[in-house]
Image: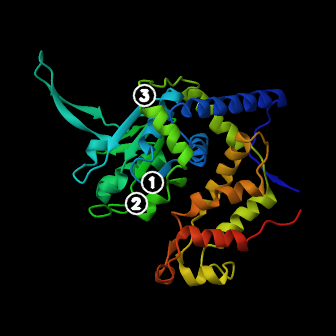
Amino acid sequence: MSTITTAPPTEAAEVKSRVRRFQEAQAAIKQEVRKVIVGQEEVIEHVLISLFVGGHCLLTGLPGTAKTLLVRTLSQTLGLRFNRIQFTPDLMPSDITGTDIIEENPSTGHRTWTFVPGPIFSNVLLADEINRTPPKTQSALLEAMQELSCTVRGHIYHLEPPFFVLATQNPIELEGTYPLPEAQLDRFLFNTVLDYLPAEDELKVVDLTTTTHKPSVDVVTSGAEILQFQELVRMTPVAESVARYAVELVRATRPNQNGDAPDFIKKYVNFGASVRAVQFLVLAGKARALMQGRFHVSYEDVRALAVPIMRHRVLLNFHAESDRLSTDDILRKLLDWKTTPRV
């Protein structure tokens, strides 16, 4: 069985040491985050996978589900520079990227342009309620998310890696909101949904937040080490059969794809997932495998991550709306249809 890998020739002992440190760090991050955040295990896993892949994560949840608190706690644990942008209808692109101002030298009287960086110049950027601002301002994030740079008055300013955007959006109170354009949605690795906690977890939240106790979060890693983790994830091998399964799964979401799509996709889907979905499925699968102590990607990794990776990349038509089917319903049906090959 052939394997797709880009790993350079590295000593086995060194690789094992790096993998050991990766697993220690991700376990320590989870332990610190759990001091503040109760439950939401799957959400925490998706956020960490995004971090280790070098991608961005969209958090969709009702008010009071600890979206902002999760991001702030994670940035404290990682020891990274954190900035928060509260998106509002009057937010301008320059409020995100920064702007040039004219400064006068008191001694010479000469005036010069000086660039004042905006909040985008950080390592962890929380874009809070990103769907509250117009598309022109939303698009100010596009270049930064894809190219790690921003352009102001024709000048390109590069962002220091790691750069990690965690955007939140509220699925209710849709009046006065601006749905994210498909081009921007496609740049998010995950669209992770935060739901209400079980009763026992809610009781733990009450115990944790209604006393004088204030949990202290320790720094367990650094930006330089996170970049090493991202390199390690890309070195993880994936079997050609698993990569092919990911490709076939994504191609099956496209209704016009030469007979690869099942009938229910052709009936309910207008546009399927892009090639970026395949790339993210494989990359996220590599990170998930390492986090679980494995050294290769499995079919289960691909299947476990398919829904949060593709739910914002598949556009349904009016037939789905008429039959009250959501994107998640269609994707779960697709997973039932596209079973894993027998070994």
Q: Is residue 104 visible?
A: yes
* Mark 2 neighbour density, 10 Å: few (under 14) some (14–19) many (20 or more): some
CA–CA distance in space, label 1 to label 3? 26 Å
Q: Position of residue 137 (x, y in %)?
A: 30, 53
Q: Position of residue 245 (x, y in %)?
A: 75, 64
Residue position for label 1: 61
Count up the numbered dots: 3
Dot 3: element: loop
Q: Which residue shows up at 61% across the image and 54% down it?
A: 280
| Amino acid type for the residue under numbered disc 3 | Thr
In the current view of this chain or complex, which residue is farthest to the top?
107
Please give the name of the residue rendered at 75% of the width and 29% of the height, measured from the top-left corner: 20
Is residue 318 toward the left or the right of residue 257 in the image?
left
Is there a contact, CB below 8 Å, between mark 2 and mark 1? yes
Task: Name the residue tied to disc 2.
Answer: 171
Which residue is rendered at x = 53% and y = 48% of the image?
199
Lower sequence index among marks 2 and 3 = 2
Q: Is residue 341 above or below residue 288?
A: below
Residue corresponding to mark 3: 211
